[in-house]
């Protein structure tokens, strides 16, 4: 005999979930009561928001399902910012929360049960993944009311969330339902779920339309987004075949990185945009072409654009396309494109990147930022992971590092959530991946309690903490807009004493010594903080610099 909570943990285990993240509460203890060696371990964090950030970090590092578990009412509401970041960034994430006991509820509305709220799932509805089935839209945010409803919803959502484009979902389960024994057979996926999967599998690619659209086009570019992370090798092969430069979104960093045509520059740098403007056509794979990646759509797009995407609706809000190929099988699309006649070599992307990066390094505004980037490149192993925050140091590392593989860096410019990096590092680190956190003094303060999680779990996390005395990016914004400098300068603790209080190693460094310091840290599996101080000029990928000549 198993409880509903036990059945759900078994379903997660079958999907490969080894570790989930959460905080126990009086309403969700059913999950902790059901723990066993064959079920996912639940890593306890110090704030509910952190459990979703941790799951998000794991989902980005692996490309697989990650799970967060929280409790009713304020516990669930505390996760909303992190849930929005995961959802907007397309992380495959499931948030499961307890809800108030069904037996004590009133049909007329709330009555003062502990943590109670009306329609708890509604707060997640604007952000959760949506799927279209037979012309009807299903939102993957649901409050369940019975044992079979809860288990059936978990079964379906695990399938829905795995389909491209991936996203985040929420399931709420009454606390008394979680603890019920469940003796029935676990249901198979519903007809709606099966119909949706078959619908996506049966999408056809019109090869003649693609051939016609590219007929006579010689200079082709490739734009790879986060949805193309699973086809990096195919993008590399296609780029070599068509001699096509590869541009990537922030989420697509590393896609096609083994090609000589891979740009190690963001589109925000003039050299990259000049290459794009010379392309006659752009093949877009799995990208929404959002505002932050395109300077609010002011970059010089080629005359012809072809979109390959499982759900191109958002992309089409952002740019007009000459051809839209709706497909969940992007690899199949690249296979057909490789049968087209090859194109002649027309541009030396590698040399352009070398020259541009040297220009930035030698510039007054870019020297320190590129020194930070170079130190990480020289020292942090490719197989390890890097999590960046919304901080000037994070903007440099997240965008300018020469990524050698997909899923090497997590960068939270899906929704843009300050405080992301430290709690997000818990996910990959708890699964044995040595992780570098690149954050500022403002962002780390959002989740300082998670230093306790790092220490208690003995996680292989190195925190590269850049202390510039406050919110450096906002200080720069105020300067650019000729605003007074207000609210951006922060009181900070003694970082060394703070680290020591959590029994975490502490090292103070400068940019010149940083590579050697990080190299030694990468060789250890112990938690540590590396502090650098002083102001660094923001990179061109930040919006206040978009209008610079």
Image (cartoon, rainbow, N blue to C red):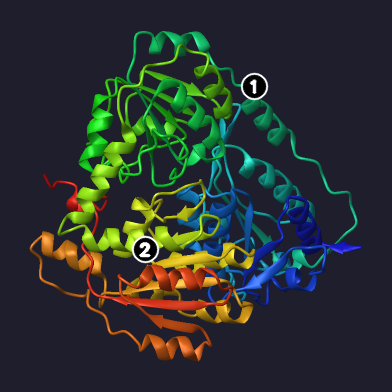
- The correct choice, above or below, for 211 with respect to 239 in the image is above
Asked whether residue 13 appears in the rendered view, the answer is yes
Q: Which mark is residue 375?
A: 2
Estimate how packed mark 1 is, as few (under 14), some (14 to 19) or many (20 or more) residues with alpha carbons within 10 Å.
Answer: few
Is 506 left, or right, of 184 in this rendering? left
Q: Quadrant of residue 101?
A: bottom right
Say whether residue 490 is left or right of residue 160. Answer: left
Q: Nearer the viewer, residue 431 or 516?
A: 516
Q: Position of residue 112 (x, y in %)?
A: 58, 75
User: Upstream in the sequence, badge 1 or badge 2?
Assistant: 1
Instruction: Residue 260: give x, y in percent of width and height.
Output: 41, 34
Residue 134: percent from left, percent from top: 61, 26
Q: Which is more toward the observer, 484 or 398? A: 398
Give 131 or 163, whichever is nearer the viewer: 163
Q: Residues within 10 Å of mark 2 (few under 14, many from 20)?
A: many
Residue 539: x and y in percent read 24, 55
Q: Identify the element where label 1 is drawn.
A: loop
Residue 202: numbered disc = 1
Residue depicted at x 36% and y 18%: 322
């Amino acid at each position: 005999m198993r409880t509903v909570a036990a059945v759900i943990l078994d379903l997660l285990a079958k999907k490969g979930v080894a570790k989930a993240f959460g905080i126990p509460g009086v309403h969700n203890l059913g999950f902790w009561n059901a723990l066993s060696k064959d079920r996912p371990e639940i890593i306890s964090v110090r704030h509910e928001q952190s459990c979703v950030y941790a799951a998000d970090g794991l989902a980005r590092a692996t490309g697989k399902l990650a799970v967060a578990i929280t409790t009713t009412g304020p516990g669930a509401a505390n996760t909303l910012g992190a849930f929005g970041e995961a959802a907007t960034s397309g992380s495959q994430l499931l948030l499961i929360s307890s809800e108030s006991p069904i037996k004590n509820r009133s049909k007329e509305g709330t009555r003062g049960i502990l943590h109670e709220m009306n329609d708890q799932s509604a707060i997640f509805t604007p952000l959760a993944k949506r799927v279209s089935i037979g012309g009807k839209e299903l939102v993957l945010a649901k409050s369940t009311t019975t044992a079979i409803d809860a288990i059936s919803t978990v079964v379906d959502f695990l399938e829905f969330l795995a389909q491209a484009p991936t996203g985040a979902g929420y399931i709420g389960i009454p606390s008394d339902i979680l603890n019920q024994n469940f003796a029935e057979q676990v249901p198979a996926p519903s007809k709606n779920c099966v119909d949706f999967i078959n619908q996506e599998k049966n999408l056809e690619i019109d090869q003649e339309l693609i051939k016609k659209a590219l007929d006579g086009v010689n200079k082709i570019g490739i734009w790879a987004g986060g949805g193309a992370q699973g086809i990096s090798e195919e993008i590399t092969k296609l780029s070599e075949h068509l001699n096509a430069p590869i541009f990537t979104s922030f989420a697509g960093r590393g896609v096609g990185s083994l090609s000589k045509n891979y740009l190690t520059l963001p589109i925000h740098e003039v050299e990259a945009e000049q290459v794009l403007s010379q392309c006659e056509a752009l093949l877009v794979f799995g990208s929404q072409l959002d505002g932050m990646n395109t300077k609010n759509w002011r970059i010089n797009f080629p005359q012809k654009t072809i979109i390959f995407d499982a759900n191109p609706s958002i992309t089409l809000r952002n740019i007009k396309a000459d051809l839209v190929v709706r497909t969940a099988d992007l690899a199949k699309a690249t296979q057909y494109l490789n049968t087209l006649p090859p194109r002649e070599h027309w541009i030396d992307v590698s040399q352009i990147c070398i020259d541009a990066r040297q220009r930035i390094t030698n510039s007054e505004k870019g020297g320190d930022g590129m020194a930070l980037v170079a130190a990480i490149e020289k020292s942090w192993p490719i197989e390890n992971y890097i999590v960046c925050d919304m901080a000037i140091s994070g903007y440099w590392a997240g965008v300018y590092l020469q990524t050698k593989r997909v899923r090497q860096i997590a960068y939270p410019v899906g929704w843009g959530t300050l405080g992301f990096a430290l709690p997000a590092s818990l996910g990959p680190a708890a699964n044995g991946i040595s992780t570098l956190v690149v954050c500022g003094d403002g962002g780390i303060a959002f989740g300082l309690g998670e230093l306790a999680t790092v220490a208690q779990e003995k996680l292989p996390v190195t925190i590269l903490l850049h202390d510039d005395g406050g919110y450096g990016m906002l200080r720069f914004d105020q300067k650019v807009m000729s605003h007074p400098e207000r609210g951006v300068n922060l009181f900070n603790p003694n970082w060394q004493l703070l680290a020591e209080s959590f029994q975490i190693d502490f090292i103070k460094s400068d940019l010149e010594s940083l590579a050697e310091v990080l190299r030694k840290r990468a060789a250890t599996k112990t938690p540590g903080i590396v502090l650098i101080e002083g102001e660094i000029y923001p990179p061109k990928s930040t919006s206040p610099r978009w209008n610079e000549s």
